[in-house]
Image: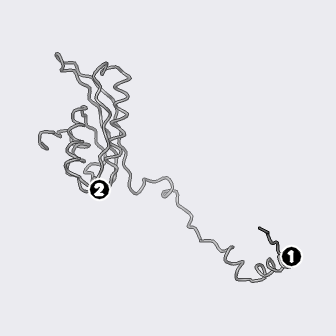
Amino acid sequence: MSSQVAPASQASNNSRSLSSSPNRNLEFISRPQFKQQTFDEIYGVPENFLEIEVRSPETHVGYGRGMYTDYEIVCRTNIPAFKLKYSVVRRRYSDFEYFRDILERESSRVTIPPLPGKVFTNRFSDEVIEHRREGLERFLQIVAGHPLLQTGSKVLCGFIQDPQWDRNHWL
């Protein structure tokens, strides 16, 4: 196995032939023209935006197993599929379970992500509630941000925006 090296005179001839062609140099120099952005384009409201936040967990005390925690869902958007630009509703974990089941039945083309798991011990501790809140927020951000669900789901906008949402309506 032998390697061949071009003589120095041949290598310099090759480099001269590349640089001697004026059209070849222009190919590398020409750049696309960029339009300067305006202040509004840089700092204005994005064309489409969706912000979903799950916050302010509240634990409600009842008798026996009547204790539960619900969460505030805040939605800010300018996406036309959503009826309101800003909304705040409260939902409990069991509402999320029903909502997820409805989405799975309603949409066979989209894989619906899992909810954070059920907790059976120490479920009202601050750590457990915060972990669940984070999981519910991730779930909603994925689901609400999916374009097929935004346009094809009958339950999505109501769950996120309607304070009178009733899971029994969808059973």
Comparing 154 with 36, the one in front is 154
Give the residue type that dot 1 points to: Pro
- The answer to whether residue 104 is left or right of residue 140 is left
Q: As drawn, is 12 to the left or to the right of 24?
A: right
Residue found 54% across the figure and 61% down from its top: 37
- Binning the other alpha carbons within 10 Å of mark 1 as few (below 14), some (14 to 19) or many (20 upward) gives few
In this rendering, the answer to whether 139 lies above or below 29 is above
Q: In the picture shown, does residue 65 fall above or below 14? A: above
The image quadrant of residue 86 is top left
Q: Position of residue 79 (x, y in %)?
A: 32, 54
Residue 21, image x, y percentages: 75, 83
Instruction: Tell me whether circle 2 and circle 1 mark residues in contact (CB < 8 Å).
Output: no
Q: Could you classify mark 2 by the number of other residues whose Cα lies within 10 Å: few (under 14), some (14-19), or many (20 or more)?
A: few
Q: How is the image coloured?
A: one colour
165 above or below 126? Answer: below
Q: Answer with the quarter of the image where residue 12 lies.
A: bottom right
**N-term mark: 2 or 1:** 1
Q: In the rendering, at what x and y percent does residue 165 appear?
A: 18, 40
Q: Number of numbered discs present?
A: 2
Q: Quadrant of residue 171?
A: top left
Q: Is residue 28 left or right of residue 61?
A: right
Classify the position of the N terminus by image quarter: bottom right
Residue nearest the viewer, comparing 81 with 39: 81
Give the residue displayed 21% in from the left and 42% down from the top.
101
- Secondary element under disc 1, as helix, strand or loop, is loop
- The residue wearing badge 1 is 7
Q: Residue furthest front?
A: 1
Provide the secondary structure element on which disc 2 rests. helix
The kind of residue tagged 2 is Leu
**Residue 36 located left or right of residue 122:** right
Which residue was labeled with disc 2? 148
